[in-house]
Image: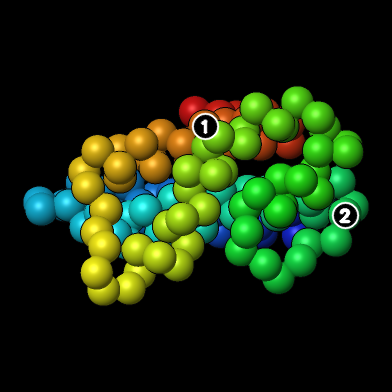
Amino acid sequence: MKNLTAQWVRKAEADLAAADQLFRLKPPLTDPACFHCQQAAEKYLKAMLCEQGLPVPKIHLLTDLLNRLLPVDATLAALRPRVVRLSRFAVDYRYPGIHVSSRQATTALKSATQVREEIRQRLGLRTR
């Protein structure tokens, strides 16, 4: 694995750990937990781009990042529902007026974990 890919993976793992810890608080901090879920998925997709030798754009649109990977691994299309679900947590829920429910946060954490497992598998890393 490329050194820069490993750095992206470490950042993604840190975001997923932060999301998990924020969700476990009493009461859970669901808004920031979901933001970190989105960030973990973003960084895992960027790790895969990096490993494939593709440009890593400074964007946050998960579907755009996924679309850049599909020509080299069409099976990643199975992640589309998860990245669509996570994309909304990049910005909207960070502003007043809307909040993430515990149910949404649980789903976001599962989605981010599924993105993690798929990308780690392709990078030859343990998933658990």
Count numbered badges in the picture.
2
Amino acid type at mark 2: Leu
Q: Which mark is residue 54?
A: 2
Q: Earlier in the sequence, mark 2 or mark 1?
A: 2
Q: Nearer the viewer, residue 117 or 79?
A: 79
**Whole-percent x, y for residue 103 in the image:** 24, 38
Going by the image, does 6 lie left or right of 33? right
Residue in view at x 52 percent, y 32 percent: 114
**Whole-percent x, y for residue 65 in the image:** 71, 52
Quarter occupied by the N terminus: top right
Q: Is residue 127 above or below residue 105?
A: above
Amino acid type at mark 1: Gln
Q: Is residue 74 above or below residue 5?
A: above
**How many residues crowd mark 2 within 10 Å: few (<14), some (14–19), many (20+)?**
some
**How many residues crowd mark 1 within 10 Å: few (<14), some (14–19), many (20+)?**
some
Q: Nearer the viewer, residue 124 or 31?
A: 31
Report helix, strand or loop for mark 1: helix
Q: Which mark is residue 10?
A: none
Residue in view at x 76 percent, y 66 percent: 57
**Whole-percent x, y for residue 24 in the image:** 20, 46
Going by the image, does 71 lie left or right of 17? right
Which residue lies most toward the left here? Answer: 26
Going by the image, does 99 lie left or right of 116? left
Q: Nearer the viewer, residue 97 or 41?
A: 97
Which residue lies most toward the bottom here? Answer: 96
